[in-house]
Every structure is written in structure tokens, then in C-alpha cells.
């Protein structure tokens, strides 16, 4: 199992976080200095929590709801029954994110992914033929051929076993040697190109490739990612993000909300019992409308949506980067043109999910004719794409994610209301399960989301295209500002957009920790020599720099 290192920058965040010497120290005379943190998603709240432990005073601004893309919507008054509108499955190898889940003592359970024990029954419905299965072995041979071709393609085209072994051993020299070659080979090429030109898939039929796109292996269909750079897929596979995933009982939003309330442990400067909540009198400041350089050339002025302006020595932005040119009026001189280019080239994936609450997990009823559950976690080439079933115990209300779709499949329902989306999805499921009256189990109102229509997001998460490696590198490395022109210093970036593994909360947390290192350095602080941070190890671990 991966120890949670990422191939681009194999820094061990978990070790840094848990080391007894802590994340560093800032000079006593800057204790209590205010730092603006824009966004109360996981990256903003993690950064704020760690900055406060160092003795700084984070001031969080939030335009919408705390939690950001970890949004767990409750059905009516049923407290434990939630719809996970954003992040919902968290790999065990995402150790920076899991550090906070463990710190809060939140309960986790295996996520009901296709063909896992947690799912029980899985139904694969392609070309109008539903097949019931518990494991891959229950599916017809063509599915095993597809799985085998994928494994072979990864071995032959991406040296998977070698780099996985290096990641598990923490052998950074070996990781770099293999990964840097892959970056050069695959930055310009898509996921689809990787499949179509692999020997293992080109020896098989088009149907095999199609099945791979619609069923995938791990979490479900991958064809929505076919236009993305292959590097993004390789990172996910190599880091083990597709394996051993858990859900958070009661919803992932709790990670953000509870961290906000958690008393700071071993904090410099602040009295015992201080929390982010107590530092903010209970609520974050309103959304940010503008960012400007203060006339002294040093500080940065944050103006909120009510026109209140305050200047800060350091500001951390965690919003989606498109918002810096659309929703927030940002003084252009705060970033170099190279960085503006990277921020604006970010490309987002679209995503829609529609959920309903049901009276009980009826899908666990066994059909005596087949021995399988009457319904299962469903992967289909029809418009629902992925249907996930969440069980809260026998005879307790349960949740169906009727449809989780990406890109074109998500756009098809964009103008539709929650009711219309639910109706459409139930119509589709009726075709797959003609003898099952799913509708009779539905209670309450459906819940739906399309992240691209929310002005505080504009998209679900980054999905880098071929040729985007250099932009990713510029954004990820932005926390080290020593060689920046003074006019570009003091504003920091973190979050999903800045991460090498967009769409995974663990990547967002890693970038928050980078920003903590950068802000510590900005205030004249440093790490303990026994516990070097990401900026201290940059020279040994830095992501490959491709020629501009
Ligand atoms: C559909 C979907 C599925 C996902 N599935 C998974 C998964 O299964 N596993 C996983 O690990 N990850 C998953 N992710 C990714 C994960 O949710 C993100 O990586 C993570 O939540 C991002 O956190 P963040 O802090 O970077 O950004 P955000 O959560 O976006 O936080 C940024 C915050 O900034 C706020 N904001 C915007 N504008 C302003 C402004 N002007 N002023 C102040 N605040 C502002 C926003 O309201 C938001 O709260 C998924 C995401 C989506 C959308």
C-alpha cells in the first residue's frame, strides 16, 4: 500500500504533520499577526488551523457555505442521512487528509464501490444487458480481458510495479527517475491516446476499450476523463487513490466543521481552548470582493462584499482560480503574468449528482432466482452512469445516489430541476430493473447539484489537459516566493486547483500545508531542523521543470 507519496513531489506530509517538533516556529513579535484566508473549504480551514497553532491569527472569509466541496446535505430532519454532493470516497493512501479525519475521531466505513464487499451486489448494464455480480469473476470473460489489458498497459507504458514499489519504499531517487521520464513522455498526450496506442488494448476489439470507458476498474467509468492528460490518471493509479476508499459516516463536511470548532492543540501564543471558531466570534467573514496592493507596497487589502476593507501582510486564496478573474476584482500586479496564464488555463470537469432518500435499503432483499440482491450498485452506459447505494442499517432510511455523472453526461441535465432529474434517473433505472418498484421506496424531496452553475465554484474540480504540466507546476510551486519580484509576494494559493491530484481532497490538503510553510517563511519563521517542511526539501524533491 502506498505511504501516500505523490510522484511529482514525493514529500511525506504525514510525517511532517505528526513529528513531535511540529510544523515550525514564527518569531514571537509576529505572534497574533493576522492572515486572510479566502475560502472555508478543507484547504482553507486546514491552513487556518495550522497557522493558528503557529501563533498567527487566521481571518477566514467565506462567500457561501463552510465545507466548500465537502458538502453533505441532510434530507429533511433525518440527521444521519446525508447526500454527499462533493467528495464522498477517501482513499486510505490519502494520508494528509486522513490525518485530520483521525484527529477528529470521525467514523469511516468502506465505500460501496463496484465489485467490492461493501457494495454487495454490483450490476453492470451495457448495451441493454444487465449483469449481476459480486466480484470480477462473476462477469463474462471479456471483462477480465479488459482488466488484464489495463494492468498490462500500465506495466508496459508506465512501469507501474517499479514506481509503486519506489513510492511504497519512499525511495525518492527511484520515484524521480521513473516519473520524470513519464512526464516527458505523457504530458502532451491524453488518457485515450494511452489506451488506444497500448499494445494490450490495440490487440483487442474496440468493444474492449468501450467497456473500459464505461465500467473502468476501481470507482467506475473513466471515459469522461479520456481527453485529460494521461499524467493525471497515472498519479491517481500510482498513489493508490482508486483503492481502499472509505466514506465518512455522517458526511465529509464534518471534517471542515469540526476542525473549525476543535481547540488548537499545542498552540503557540493562544490560550488553551482557542479554536478557529472562537477566533472568529463563531462565523467566518463574508465573501471577498476585491484584492489590492496597499499603497505601502507591502500589505494586501482584502475588501469583502459589504465594502469592509482590511490590510494583511499575507493572504491565502483557496477558491477555484477562475474566480480570481470573474468574481473577485484582483489587482493584476499581485501575480506575475506567468502565474496568471496558469491560473486562467485551469480546466474544470463538470459533474452532477442526484440523490433520493428511501424508506429502507430494499436493494439488500435477495432475489431467490439469482441469489443476488434485487438491485446493486449500478454502472451503465445509459444516462445515469453510476448509481451508488448507501445503507444505514436494516429498516433504517437509506440513500440512493441515483446518478453521478461527469462532463457531457452531467451537462445533459444542467437545465433540469431536482424533480426532473430524479424522474429521468428513475425512468432509466426502471429499464434496468423492470420488476422492481424503486419509486415506491422514495421518501422526501430529491437533492441535486451541478457545481458549474454555482458562482462560488464554476466547476467540479480541475481536470488538466495535455500540455498543462507546466501550469500545474507554476501553481504548485507558488508557495516558495524567495525569487519572486516583491510585488508578487505575500499572496499564497492552495486548494484543489493547485494540487497535482485534483478531485481528491488529499491533494487540496497537501497544498494547504505547502502554503503554511510559505506563510511561515514570509513571517520570518522556520521549521525545526529535525522536521523539514515541503519548502526545505524542495531542492531534492522539486517537480521536474520542463523547458518553457
Ligand atoms: C462532485 C465532486 C466529487 C468529488 N469526489 C471526491 C472524492 O470522492 N474524494 C475526494 O477526496 N475528493 C473528491 N472531490 C474533491 C474534493 O471535494 C476537493 O478536492 C476539496 O473539497 C477541495 O477543497 P478546497 O478547499 O480546495 O476548495 P473548496 O472546497 O472549493 O473551498 C473553497 C471555498 O471558497 C469559497 N469561495 C468562493 N469564492 C469566494 C469568495 N469570493 N470569498 C470567499 N470565499 C469564497 C467557496 O464557497 C468554497 O467554500 C470531489 C469534488 C466534487 C465537486
Image: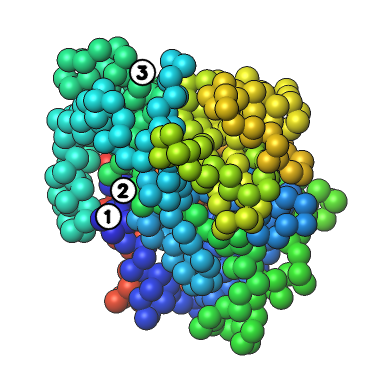
From what the image shows, is residue 317 above or below residue 441?
below
Residue that sits furthest to the right in the current view:
306
Give the quarter of the image for residue 213.
top left
Q: Is residue 299 visible?
A: no
Kindly indicate whether the residue at mark 1 contacts the one at mark 2 (C-beta within 8 angstroms): yes
Of callouts 1 and 3, the N-terminal one = 1
Of callouts 2 and 1, the N-terminal one = 1
Between 81 and 358, the one nearer to me in the picture: 358
Pick the quarter of the image with the N terminus: bottom left
Does 33 sit left or right of 519 as displayed?
right
Number of residues whose C-alpha sits closer than 10 Å to that of mark 1, classed few (under 14), some (14–19) or many (20 or more)? many
Give the structural element (helix, strand or loop) at label 3: helix
* x and y, in percent, of residue 423 in the image: 70, 27
From what the image shows, is residue 77 above or below residue 115?
below
The Cα–Cα distance between marks 2 and 1, rounded to whole angstroms, is: 6 Å
Number of residues whose C-alpha sits closer than 10 Å to that of mark 2, classed few (under 14), some (14–19) or many (20 or more)? many
Give the structural element (helix, strand or loop) at label 1: loop
Residue that sits furthest to the bottom in the current view:
272
Between 396 and 498, the one nearer to me in the picture: 396
* x and y, in percent, of residue 464 in the image: 43, 31
> Which residue is tagged 1?
2
Between 151 and 139, the one nearer to me in the picture: 139
Does 239 sit left or right of 376 as displayed?
left
Of callouts 3 and 2, the N-terminal one = 3
* x and y, in percent, of residue 203 in the image: 17, 15
From what the image shows, is residue 141 above or below residue 242?
above
Residue 239 is tagged as 2
The Cα–Cα distance between marks 1 and 3, rounded to whole angstroms, is: 29 Å
> Which residue is tagged 3?
210
Taking the spot 57% from the left edge, 27% from the top edge, the residue there is 435
Does 81 sit left or right of 433 as displayed?
right
Give the quarter of the image for residue 273.
bottom right
Amino acid at each position: 500500500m502506498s505511504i501516500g507519496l505523490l510522484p511529482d513531489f514525493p514529500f511525506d506530509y504525514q510525517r511532517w504533520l505528526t513529528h513531535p517538533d511540529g510544523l515550525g516556529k514564527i518569531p514571537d513579535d509576529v505572534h497574533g499577526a493576522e492572515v486572510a484566508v479566502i475560502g472555508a473549504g478543507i484547504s482553507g480551514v486546514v491552513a487556518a488551523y495550522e497557522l493558528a497553532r503557529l501563533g498567527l491569527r487566521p481571518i477566514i472569509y467565506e462567500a457561501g457555505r463552510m465545507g466548500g466541496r465537502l458538502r453533505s446535505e441532510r434530507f429533511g430532519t433525518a440527521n444521519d442521512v446525508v447526500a454527499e454532493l462533493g467528495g464522498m470516497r477517501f482513499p486510505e493512501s490519502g494520508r494528509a487528509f486522513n490525518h485530520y479525519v483521525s484527529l477528529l475521531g470521525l467514523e469511516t466505513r468502506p465505500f460501496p464501490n463496484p465489485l467490492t464487499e461493501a457494495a454487495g451486489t454490483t450490476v453492470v448494464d451495457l448495451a441493454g444487458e444487465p449483469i449481476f455480480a459480486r466480484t470480477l469473476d462473476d462477469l463474462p470473460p471479456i471483462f477480465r480481458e479488459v482488466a488484464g489489458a489495463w494492468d498490462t498497459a500500465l506495466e508496459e507504458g508506465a512501469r507501474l510495479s517499479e514506481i509503486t514499489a519506489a513510492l511504497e519504499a519512499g525511495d525518492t531517487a527511484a520515484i524521480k527517475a521513473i516519473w520524470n521520464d513519464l512526464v516527458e513522455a505523457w504530458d502532451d498526450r491524453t488518457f485515450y491516446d494511452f489506451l488506444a496506442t497500448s499494445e494490450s488494448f490495440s490487440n483487442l476489439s474496440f468493444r474492449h476499450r468501450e467497456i473500459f470507458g464505461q465500467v473502468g476498474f476501481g470507482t467506475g467509468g473513466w471515459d469522461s476523463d479520456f481527453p485529460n492528460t494521461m499524467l493525471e490518471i497515472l498519479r491517481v493509479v500510482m498513489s493508490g487513490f482508486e483503492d481502499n476508499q472509505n466514506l465518512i459516516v455522517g458526511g465529509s463536511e464534518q471534517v471542515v466543521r469540526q476542525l473549525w470548532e476543535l481547540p488548537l492543540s499545542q498552540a503557540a501564543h493562544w490560550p488553551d481552548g482557542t479554536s478557529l471558531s472562537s477566533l472568529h466570534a463563531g462565523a467566518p467573514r463574508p465573501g471577498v470582493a476585491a484584492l489590492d496592493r496597499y499603497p505601502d507596497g507591502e500589505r494586501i487589502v482584502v475588501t469583502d462584499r459589504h465594502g469592509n476593507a482590511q490590510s494583511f501582510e499575507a493572504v491565502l486564496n483557496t477558491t477555484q482560480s477562475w474566480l480570481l478573474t470573474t468574481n473577485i476584482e484582483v489587482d493584476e500586479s499581485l501575480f506575475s503574468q506567468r502565474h496568471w496564464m496558469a491560473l486562467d488555463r485551469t480546466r474544470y470537469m463538470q459533474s452532477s449528482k442526484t440523490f433520493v432518500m428511501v424508506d429502507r435499503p430494499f436493494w439488500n432483499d435477495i432475489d431467490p432466482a439469482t441469489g443476488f440482491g434485487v438491485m446493486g450498485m449500478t454502472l451503465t452506459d445509459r444516462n445515469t452512469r453510476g448509481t451508488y447505494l448507501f445503507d444505514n442499517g436494516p429498516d433504517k432510511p437509506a440513500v440512493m445516489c441515483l446518478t453521478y455523472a461527469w462532463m457531457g453526461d452531467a451537462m445533459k441535465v444542467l437545465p433540469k430541476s431536482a424533480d426532473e432529474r430524479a424522474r429521468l434517473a428513475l425512468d432509466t433505472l426502471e429499464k434496468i430493473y423492470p420488476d422492481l418498484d424503486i419509486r415506491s421506496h422514495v421518501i422526501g424531496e430529491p437533492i441535486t447539484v451541478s457545481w458549474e452553475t454555482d458562482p462560488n465554484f464554476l466547476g467540479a474540480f480541475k481536470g488538466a489537459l495535455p500540455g498543462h504540466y507546466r501550469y500545474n507546476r507554476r501553481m504548485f510551486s507558488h508557495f516558495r516566493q524567495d525569487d519572486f519580484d516583491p510585488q508578487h509576494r505575500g499572496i499564497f494559493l492552495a486548494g484543489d486547483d493547485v494540487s497535482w491530484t485534483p478531485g481528491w481532497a488529499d491533494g487540496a490538503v497537501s497544498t494547504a500545508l505547502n502554503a503554511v510553510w510559505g506563510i511561515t517563511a514570509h513571517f520570518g519563521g522556520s521549521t525545526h531542523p529535525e522536521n523539514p517542511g515541503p519548502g526545505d526539501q524542495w531542492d531534492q524533491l522539486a517537480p521536474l521543470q520542463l523547458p518553457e
